[in-house]
DNA sequence: GTCAAATCAATGCGTTCGTATTGAGAAGGA
DNA sequence: TCCTTCTCAATACGAACGCATTGATTTGAC
């Protein structure tokens, strides 16, 4: 139900994606301002300024709507990270790439903070849905793999396996997600979070000692 | 509505707290297995094996019920941390105390992981309720202050102000909460999280250089 | 122009929600 | 014993919910 795609052949298609996205954007606003439990067809329709019938047309059931919103927000987050990667491999030094990636994992603008709040809401929502929880887990696993690979490339260590850098990648990911969470709560500012993350990252990048597996 | 206390004078009082707690425990189970949006009087009553009337008697409105559950789970978390502190100040070396505190911030047993999932659900719930969000923020602020104080005591640095250790305390808190989150998702095991946190903590404890304010 | 497909507003149905009300039993000080 | 208070089960009510249905309108291939 995730790769249904659009009608493609006969569909009017013109404003299809645009109208669909507008509905999803209304869902995001509701989640951010009223909480995920307020996602109802009537409220979404009202917020989007459309009829309930239209919402039903684009999303046959409420579950479809929530699932589409979940997919959209996670894909948007993934795209954010991918855009931080250089288009040509070996184009930029790995240290700069990993700095960019870590920087993307911390919300800076108010729009990014809004996105993180919505993602946190859906992540919590996924806790009681094994299928969705699996997707979240795979996203995090992918991030760890990416970070470990970049750290490996930076150290230019041909002997060590990629996996040798996984513990440090795990620490980096935990630190950044934790910092992002504290930023959302308001305990620290985005700038403080960014400084802490990059300071720690630079220490890891400078560390000449071979990493050892931690558990 | 948080410090109402019990009737105290005339109430039968005997099984009052016990019955009240049983209802809250049912709320926790529902939040953990079905999500916070499934907190309804009928479902809570069914899960607790009592009548809807009894739930209404102990919690006049649904908001009262949710707020009481929120308060109960956060207080339980706070007690968990306090129990890690030595009863007599200056009794244990600060390094051991901070190790114990950090250890408590990472879920190890399945019961602790259950508690963290519930706390995450309520934390997300609080995102759209300023009053509750404030409580969460103050809890985190208190943890940072505690960690900074312990780090200060460990270094025995009379010159530096407590605030000089705040950035490291912030990093520690972000790291542990991030690790806890990754543990809940299943990306890392509790043991891996524990190892990463204590390894980083020990590095901070061993660091002889004066900490400098980071933002 | 024709016509099937797409679009979507309007409305009704059955369910579930939170809450208010009522009344019956149990408890315990007077 | 009496009588107030606590306890709480039962139930009714209006609102809001997800969803199915219907029909009017628009679109785009032919």
Image (cartoon, coloured by chain):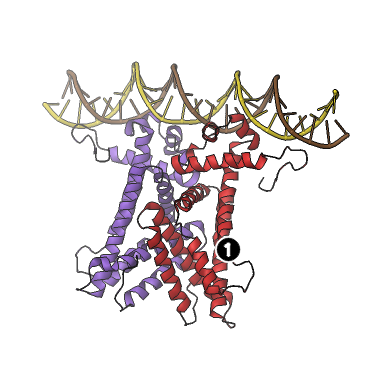
Chain colours: A purple, B red, C brown, D yellow
Q: Position of residue A28 (x, y in %)?
A: 41, 45
Q: Where is residue B93 in the image (x, y as percent from the top left)?
A: 56, 75
Q: In this view, does A30 lie to the left or right of D20?
A: right
Residue A107 seen by the camera: no
- Identified at 69% across, 48% down, the residue is B3
Q: Residues within 10 Å of mark 1 (few under 14, many from 20)?
A: few
Q: In this view, does D23 lie to the left or right of A14?
A: right
**Residue B14 falls in image quadrant:** top right
Report the front residue among A78 and B70: B70
Task: Please tell me whether residue B94 is drawn above or below residue B83 in the rendered image.
Answer: below
Report the front residue among C8 and B19: B19
**Residue B84 falls in image quadrant:** bottom right
Q: In this view, does B65 lie to the left or right of A22?
A: right
Task: Please tell me whether residue B193 is drawn above or below residue D13 in the rendered image.
Answer: below
- Identified at 34% across, 53% down, the residue is A77
**Residue B109 falls in image quadrant:** bottom left
**Residue corresponding to mark 1:** B142
Disc 1 sits on a residue from what chain? B
SS class of the residue under badge 1?
helix
Q: Position of residue B184 (x, y in %)?
A: 41, 53
Q: Position of residue B9 (x, y in %)?
A: 78, 41
| Image quadrant where one finds the N terminus of chain B | top right
Task: Please tell me whether residue A130 is drawn above or below residue A203 in the rendered image.
Answer: above
């Amino acid at each position: 139900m995730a790769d249904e795609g659009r009608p493609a052949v006969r569909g009017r298609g013109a404003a299809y994606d645009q109208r669909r996205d507008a509905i999803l954007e209304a869902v995001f606003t509701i989640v951010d301002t009223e909480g995920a439990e307020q996602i109802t067809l009537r409220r979404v329709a009202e917020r989007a300024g459309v009829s309930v019938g239209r919402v039903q047309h684009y999303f046959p059931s409420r579950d479809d709507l929530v699932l589409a919103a979940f997919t959209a927000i996670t894909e948007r987050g993934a795209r954010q990270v991918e855009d931080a990667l250089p288009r040509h491999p070996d184009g930029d030094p790995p240290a700069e790439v990993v700095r960019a990636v870590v920087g993307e994992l911390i919300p800076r603008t108010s729009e990014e903070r809004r996105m993180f709040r919505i993602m946190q809401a859906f992540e919590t929502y996924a806790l009681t849905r094994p299928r969705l929880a699996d997707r979240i887990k795979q996203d995090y696993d992918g991030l760890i793999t990416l970070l470990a690979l970049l750290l490996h490339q930076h150290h230019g260590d041909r002997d060590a396996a990629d996996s040798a850098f996984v513990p440090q990648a795990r620490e980096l990911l935990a630190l950044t997600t934790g910092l992002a969470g504290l930023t959302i709560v308001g305990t620290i500012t985005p700038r403080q979070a960014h400084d802490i993350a990059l300071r720690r990252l630079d220490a890891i990048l400078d560390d000449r000692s071979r990493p050892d597996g931690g558990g």
